[in-house]
Image: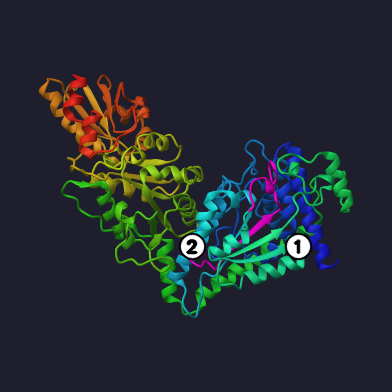
C-alpha cells in the first residue's frame, strides 16, 4: 500500500468515526471533522507530543478553536493513544462520558484547553505561543534550546469572524510569534449557508497586514499539505495556512452542504459513503489494525522525543538553563518580600506594590494591562518587556488578553495576570467564564471599581459587575478594603491553583483598618469590630468597609450597637462552615449590607441592602457618594 493510499485510509477512518459518533448520539457536527480529516492525518506526522506524558513541557501544542468538531478531536486522541477507547467514542455527548459535546481541559486526557465560544481558541493558541517565547527566553542559550516546540491551531470561518481573533492575531503578528501555525479550514460554509452571506474580506491580505506569512494549500492533497506545514515551520513570522477544504468530504450528496454542519448525516448516507471507500457499511466505529498501528506511532515517537529532550538537559552544559527552568517550575513563595502598609491608600496602589513584590520573587509571574498599566498600577518596575521581560503590552484588546492569559496559565510553569478597568471586564467575560469552568489560575486585576471612578461617569462606573462575577462558580472576587487585606488576598490566590481570582481595586484612597476582632480575610469575611449585645451587623467590602466603621460610630451615638464585618471575598465567605459564619454574622442581629454596587447577592445574609438602584453619574467621587446616599449620616439615619 502506497503512503498516500494509507493516508487516505487513515483519513477515512477519522471521517467515519466522527460520522458514527454523531449518528449514535443523534447530536453533533460531522461536517468539519470529515473536511479536516486529510489535514489531521498529515499533521499527525509533524506533531511532536507524547501520549504517555501529556504534560511534557516541550511538546507541540494543538488547539482546536472550533470546539464543535469533537468528532475529529476524540477520534484523534483515541487513535494517538491518549486513553480513550472505542466505548468512549460510542458514549459521545452522553452523561459523565469522557467525550462531551465540546472539549474540556482536565476532563479528557490530552486536551490542552477548553476553547468554548468560537474565536477563543485562536487567542489561546497565541497565548501558548507567547508563553513558549517567554519560557524560552529564560532558559534557552545561543548553543542550546530547551524550548523549541511549535503551536498549531485548527480554526474555521466562524473563528475568524469573531472579533477576538482580530485582536489576538494582531498581537501575534506584532510580537513575531514564529512558533505559531494557524490552519484555517476554509470550507466557505457556516450554519446559515455559504460564507458569501456574511463575509467578503480578503483573509490573506488581512493576515499579511497584521504581520503574518500566508500560505495556501488544497486541504485534501496529502503531499501538498505535508509540504506547506514543512515550509511553515521555517518561517520567521506566525503563519496562516489557508486550507481549501470541502465540508463533509466523502459524505455523498451531503458533501459541501451546510446541512452537514450540525446534524447527523443519516444511516443511508453513512453506509453509502463507507461502501464508496471500501469500508464495511454494516460496521460502526471501524478501525483496522494497520490504521491503528500507524497512528499509534505517536506513542513511541513522542516517548523517544521526550527522553531525548531530558537527555539533552542532563548532559549538555546547561547549569544556568536548568536552574532557570527549576525556578520556573517550582516557585518559592517564601522569597516574596511583602510590602508594609501604614497609611490610607487606594487599593490599586497597594495592589501594584504587591504585584511588584511577587514578580521580583517568582520567575514565572508576569502579565500586563490592556493599555492601562499606569492607571491599573500594574507596571512591573525594572523587570523588562516581553518576551525577555515580564511586562506584556496587550494593547487595547481586553477580549484577546483574557483568552491569551488563560493559555499562558495552562502552558506549565507560568502564573500570569491581566488587567483593565473593572467596567471593561465586560469585554473579557467569556475568557473569565472559561477560566472558572476550567479551573485556571489566572489573576484578573480590575481597578476603578465603583461610582468612585467619578468624573468619567456612568459608562465607566461598574455597578452590576461585582454581582455578575460573584455569581460565577469557581471564581473568587476579592475587593480588598486596605493594603493588608490585599496581601491576604494575594497569599490565598497564589496558593489556589485550581481557580481564577479577581482583584477589584479602588481608584480613591481608603483608610487603614484595625486588626480583625475575629476571623481573617483569608476566610473571605471576618469581624472587624465586635460589640457585646450588638443589635446590628454592618457588612461591606472594599471602599464601603471604612464607611461602615463610620456608620457604627453614628449608630452608637443613637444608642444602637453594631458589629462591622468586612467581606473582601464574598465567594470564599460562602464556602466557610455555618458555625464560622454564625460567629461572624451574629444570629439575632439585623444584618445590613453596604456596597456602592447593585448588591442583590447580599440578601444571602442581609435583611437590608444599601446599594445602587440606578446607574451612576459624572461628578467628583465625593459628590457621587453623597448623591447616592453613601455617607455615614445618611445611612445611620436610614437604619435608626
Mark 1 lies on residue: 294
Q: Mark 1 or mark 2: which comes first in sequence?
A: 2
Question: What's the mark number on residue 460?
Answer: none
Question: What's the mark number on residue 130?
Answer: 2
Task: Give the quadrant of residue 25.
Answer: top right
Report the colour scheme. Answer: rainbow
- The percent position of residue 585, horizontal first and vertical second, equals 28, 27
Do callouts 1 and 2 mark residues in contact (Cβ within 8 Å)? Answer: no
Taking the magenta stretch, the answer to whether it contains residue 530 is no
Whether residue 445 sits left or right of residue 125 in the image: it is left
> Is residue 286 placed above or below 606 in the rendered structure?
below
Q: Quadrant of the C terminus?
A: top left
Q: Quadrant of the N terminus?
A: bottom right
Please state the extent of the stretch shown in magenta in the rendering. Answer: 172-200
Task: Give the quadrant of residue 378.
Answer: bottom left
Taking the magenta stretch, the answer to whether it contains residue 178 is yes
> Is residue 31 placed above or below 473 in the rendered structure?
below
- The percent position of residue 501, horizontal first and vertical second, equals 39, 45
Camera-side residue: 18 or 156?
A: 156
Q: Nearer the viewer, mark 1 or mark 2?
A: 2
Is any atom of residue 59 visible in this view?
no
> Is residue 203 placed above or below 566 in the rendered structure?
below
Amino acid at each position: 500500500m502506497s503512503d498516500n493510499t494509507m493516508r487516505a485510509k487513515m483519513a477515512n477512518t477519522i471521517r467515519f468515526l466522527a460520522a458514527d459518533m454523531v449518528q449514535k448520539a443523534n447530536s453533533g457536527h460531522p461536517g468539519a471533522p470529515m473536511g479536516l480529516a486529510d489535514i489531521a492525518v498529515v499533521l499527525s506526522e509533524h506533531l511532536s507530543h507524547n501520549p504517555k506524558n501529556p504534560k511534557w513541557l516541550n511538546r507541540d501544542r494543538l488547539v482546536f478553536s472550533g470546539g464543535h468538531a469533537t468528532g475529529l478531536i476524540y477520534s484523534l486522541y483515541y487513535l494517538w493513544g491518549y486513553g480513550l477507547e472505542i466505548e468512549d467514542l460510542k458514549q459521545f455527548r452522553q452523561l459523565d462520558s469522557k467525550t462531551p459535546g465540546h472539549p474540556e481541559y482536565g476532563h479528557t486526557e490530552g486536551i490542552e484547553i477548553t476553547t468554548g465560544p468560537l474565536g477563543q481558541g485562536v487567542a489561546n493558541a497565541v497565548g501558548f505561543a507567547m508563553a513558549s517565547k517567554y519560557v524560552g527566553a529564560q532558559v534557552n542559550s545561543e548553543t542550546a534550546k530547551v524550548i523549541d516546540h511549535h503551536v498549531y491551531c485548527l480554526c474555521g470561518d466562524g473563528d475568524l469572524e469573531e472579533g477576538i481573533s482580530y485582536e489576538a492575531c494582531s498581537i501575534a503578528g506584532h510580537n513575531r510569534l514564529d512558533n505559531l501555525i494557524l490552519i484555517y479550514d476554509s470550507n466557505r460554509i457556516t450554519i446559515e449557508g455559504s460564507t458569501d452571506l456574511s463575509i467578503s474580506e480578503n483573509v490573506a491580505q488581512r493576515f499579511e497586514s497584521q504581520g503574518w506569512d500566508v500560505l495556501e494549500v488544497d486541504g485534501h492533497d496529502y503531499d501538498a499539505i505535508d509540504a506547506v506545514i514543512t515550509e511553515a515551520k521555517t518561517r520567521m513570522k506566525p503563519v496562516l495556512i489557508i486550507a481549501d477544504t470541502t465540508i463533509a468530504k466523502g459524505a455523498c450528496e451531503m458533501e459541501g452542504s451546510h446541512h452537514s454542519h450540525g446534524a447527523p448525516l443519516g444511516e443511508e448516507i453513512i453506509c453509502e459513503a463507507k461502501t464508496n471507500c471500501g469500508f464495511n457499511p454494516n460496521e460502526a466505529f471501524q478501525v483496522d489494525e494497520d490504521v491503528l498501528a500507524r497512528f499509534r506511532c505517536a506513542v513511541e515517537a513522542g516517548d523517544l522525543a521526550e527522553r531525548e529532550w531530558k537527555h539533552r538537559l542532563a548532559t549538555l552544559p546547561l547549569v544556568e538553563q536548568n536552574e532557570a527552568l527549576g525556578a520556573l517550575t517550582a516557585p518559592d513563595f517564601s522569597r516574596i518580600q511583602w510590602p508594609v502598609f501604614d497609611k490610607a491608600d487606594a487599593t490599586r496602589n497597594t495592589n501594584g506594590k504587591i504585584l511588584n513584590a511577587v514578580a521580583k520573587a517568582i520567575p514565572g509571574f508576569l502579565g500586563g494591562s490592556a493599555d492601562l498599566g499606569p492607571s491599573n498600577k500594574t507596571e512591573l518596575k525594572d523587570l523588562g518587556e516581553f518576551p525577555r521581560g515580564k511586562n506584556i503590552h496587550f494593547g487595547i484588546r481586553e477580549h484577546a488578553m483574557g483568552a491569551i492569559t488563560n493559555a499562558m496559565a495552562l502552558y506549565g510553569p507560568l502564573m500570569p495576570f491581566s488587567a483593565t478597568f473593572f467596567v471593561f471586564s465586560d469585554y473579557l467575560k467569556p475568557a473569565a467564564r472559561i477560566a472558572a469552568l476550567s479551573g485556571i489560575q489566572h489573576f484578573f486585576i480590575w481597578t476603578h471599581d465603583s461610582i468612585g471612578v467619578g468624573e468619567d461617569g456612568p459608562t465607566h462606573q461598574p455597578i452590576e459587575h461585582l454581582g455578575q462575577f460573584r455569581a460565577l462558580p469557581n471564581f473568587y472576587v476579592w475587593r480588598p478594603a486596605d493594603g493588608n487585606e490585599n496581601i491576604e488576598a494575594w497569599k490565598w490566590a497564589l496558593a489556589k491553583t485550581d481557580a481564577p481570582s479577581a482583584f477589584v481595586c479602588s481608584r480613591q484612597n481608603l483608610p487603614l483598618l484595625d486588626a480583625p476582632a475575629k476571623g481573617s480575610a483569608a476566610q473571605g469575611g471576618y469581624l472587624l469590630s465586635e460589640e457585646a449585645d450588638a443589635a446590628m451587623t454592618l457588612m461591606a467590602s472594599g471602599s464601603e468597609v471604612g464607611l461602615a466603621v463610620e456608620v457604627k460610630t453614628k449608630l452608637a451615638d443613637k444608642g444602637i450597637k453594631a458589629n462591622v464585618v468586612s467581606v473582601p471575598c464574598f465567594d470564599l465567605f460562602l464556602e466557610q462552615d455555618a458555625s464560622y459564619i454564625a460567629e461572624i454574622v451574629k444570629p439575632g442581629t439585623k444584618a445590613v449590607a453596604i456596597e456602592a454596587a447593585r448588591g442583590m447577592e447580599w440578601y444571602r445574609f442581609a435583611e437590608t441592602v444599601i446599594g445602587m438602584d440606578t446607574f451612576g453619574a459624572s461628578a467628583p467621587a465625593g459628590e457621587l457618594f453623597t448623591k447616592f446616599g453613601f455617607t455615614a449620616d445618611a445611612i445611620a439615619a436610614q437604619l435608626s
